[in-house]
Amino acid sequence: MTRRDVRLLLARNRGPLLALGVFAVMFGVFLHEHPRQISVNLLTTASNKAVVLALVAMAQTLPVLTRGLDLSVGSIMTMSACASSVLVNGSPSHVAFGIVLVLFGGLAAGTINGAIVVFGRIQPIIATLATGAVYFGVALLLRPSPGGDVSEGLSNALTYAVFGVPSTFLLLIAVLLLVWLPFRHSVLGRGCYAAGSAEGAAYMSGVRVGRSKMAAYMLAGLLSATAGLLLSLVALSGEASAPQSGAYTLNSIASVVIGGTSLFGGSGGMAGSVIGAFVLRTIGDLLFVFDAPPLWQPLFEGIILLGAVSLGAARVLRIKNRLELFT
Amino acid sequence: MTSGPRTPFLRMEGVSKRYGGVTALEDVNFACVPASIHAVLGENGAGKSTLIKIIAGAVQPDEGRLLIGERTVRFTSPVDAAREGIACIFQELSLMPDLSIADNICITNPPQRFGLIDRRAQFRRAEALLARVGCADLHPLELVKNLPLSRRQMVEIAKALGRNPRLLILDEATSALTAADVEKVYAILREMRNEGLAILYISHRMHEIKALADTCSIFRNGRHVETYAQGSHDDEEIVRLMIGRELKLVYPPKPQQRSAIDPVLEVRHLSWQQRLADVSLTVGRGEILGLGGLDGQGQRELLLALFGVLSDQRGDMQMNGAPIRISGPAMAKSTKVGMALIPEDRKTEGLMLPMSIRDNLSLAVLSKLSPRGVVDRAQEARHVDDAVRSLRIRVDDLNNPVSSLSGGNQQKVVIGKWLMTAARIVLLNDPTRGIDVGTKQEIYELLRKLADAGTAIVFYSTDYDELIGMCDRVLILYDGRIVRELSGAMINERSIVAAALNLSDKDASPEAASVGTAA
């Protein structure tokens, strides 16, 4: 690789790298200030807390890349968690079947979102606001009151560590390598970037825009369901909580933006969103080690988010035709 | 065909296309043969764009059929056309700015391995194609949005070549290129023609067509007028073939030629980015100054520059003899300056569509109507009623959203809104596009009345008839500069078309040498 290659690579990944830097500093301070010795346990707890949000943020990344938005990711997650508290228990084969059903439910929800956006030509924000309410309704039907039963064996396996590495973290890496990397370099994934960057140009270039957008929403549903499954395994029960569902949706958008994905579509990626989720989750831990009241958390989350968005807004300074500011 | 009968690669038979009530193409028969560069000529709105959009599969014809060889084809999307080996380079770029050059070049048919895009192969392909179009200095991983416009155009050409087309369509593809790049493109096109490719070339630049084309087709008002071998018609015949329509509208009488212009606004050496180059003009009290030329030669930018929308512009401006620097639309419309801009796209720049007719009309004068920060409703009603009456806007209820009006009445609202500011300088950007003849006539009369009352008017129109009927003087822009100034009897269709194509105009104007300086 020449120096020019490196420069281009850095420039293209500026967002995620910046987020990574912020996270490294925050996590470093956290570890330094933490009263206890750094242990696998500590890392596992930190990873478990962030991994659900990271998965939802990964889900959100895809519609955002196509210049859309998915307001139903939190609801799909909640629906899947509730379904999991009903289905994922009993004998190993029963558990396996339950997992397949839960993931299939998420995929179906994503498919409905995609179909409404692509074929119904409804704006993604309102389409997924509506379907999100529907999915949350399904969650309430599945689990009218908190409770249920989730396979403890599976829960233990997924919330501990393998050779010193938290297994939830391994799951994230696995999703990035086995789902995101292939998708990003598939024709479908390329189509998502193209559609988000300039949909008309993509269409005229013969890109199958509808197919790509459909795939984005479907995969978002699947990843949200994975998040829900994990949530139920961490909590060992299911609950249809509206505040929780809403908070995950909004935090997923924040994570995506902090991770360097443009809300205008066309640039960014899932790895950044994972880092963004970790940044958001570390804020609470930091406040904890500094003995700051946890009530400060939203305030700091807001400041970090503002900082991240301002970096992305720098392009405005270069615009010479002021009418273009509004397009 | 000069070189004997050759089977056409593509034929169109009896193709028609209408948009609403407007006929874009009517009963067009057209063919292009392999190993030939075929130029398509025509005025603004002659149907050239619709023609290539149909061939590219972006638009479906209402009637008629397309044949590839002897086989009838039906394109429902650009994908279908691409499959038949048709590649297009459009006037509006079809590149995705957030993707890298390599991604863009390979977007239609990326090299794949194990179902995934093979990035190494893609990189190599992009490198080879960039080298072929003489842009080996570009790094394939650079994002397209970081390239200057002329470079993007070269990437666009590389992208089209990467599809190994059998028919290549270039729509104004050289308009953003530097002279050196144009030479490279010529060489590539000739080479590809010799390899047996069919090339359709749409350009307004006559010298390009002379340098490149083997065959030319002329379109006028959606009809295919004539196809001839390059060289068999001279410039004047071509211009005549491109015009050929009769005047239908009656324009208000122009005032007698005045001896001197009483300048209200003077602009000296205005330049902006690569779009405006050293533009100087003067517009006087009571004068309608026309801006003409082909679409997109900088007329729109010039009006925006006068209105203070563009930043980083160079040059001086004087109002009533005193230097002035306009910082933005808010200052331009202030009583001190008194300028109004009737924008081209009324739906995005002229109107707040969901807001009421009343709110839209009073928007530009709200500060005058609200002495203490609160809108004086009675005064507002009086002003709005005046505007509705004087412009004869047909409304049931002023509280209806402005989107409920017809196109012509919407345009009157835009004009009315700015007239209420009692502007001394009115800039109009193609104000009659897409509105009916009756309303056009009313707008013409209104403009002349304003001019007679002392308003200075700068009027850009894509319709040459309008320029001829309305304007006291016409400036023709080409490539961001003023190439000719026409006045009096010189404002006729022939000289406008010739000047717009930047042809030397010896036949049409005996005093060609002296025009360009103020009349």
Image (cartoon, rainbow, N blue to C red):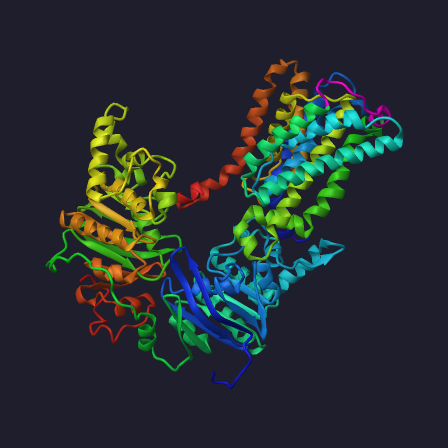
Whole-percent x, y for residue A46 in the image? 74, 25
Whether residue B123 appears in magenta in the rendering, the answer is no
Compared across the picture, whether A122 is left or right of A190 comes to left
> Where does residue A275 sit, x and y in percent of width and height?
67, 33
Q: How many marks?
A: 0
The secondary structure that dominates the magenta segment is: loop
> Compared with residue B349, is residue B473 higher up or lower down, i.e. above or below?
below
Left or right of B18 in this view: B486: left
Q: Quadrant of residue B469?
A: bottom left
Q: Is residue A151 magenta?
A: yes
The residue at 60%/49% (across/down) is A210
Residue found at x 68% / y 34%: A274
Q: Quadrant of residue B115?
A: bottom right
Residue A170 position, x and y percent, is 79, 34
Pick the quarter of the image with the C terminus of chain B. bottom left
Q: Position of residue B207 (x, y in %)?
A: 39, 73
- Tell me which residue sits at (65%, 30%) in the image: A135
User: Residue B8 appears in which quarter of the rendering?
Assistant: bottom right
> Is residue A43 among what the camera can see?
no
Q: Looking at the image, can residue A157 be seen?
A: yes
The stretch of residues the image draws in magenta is: A143-156
- Picture layout, residue B399 above or below residue B456: above
Q: Residue at x 34, y 79 (%)?
A: B234
Measured along the vertical axis of the image, is residue B294 above or below residue A28? below
In the image, is B43 to the left or to the right of A37? left
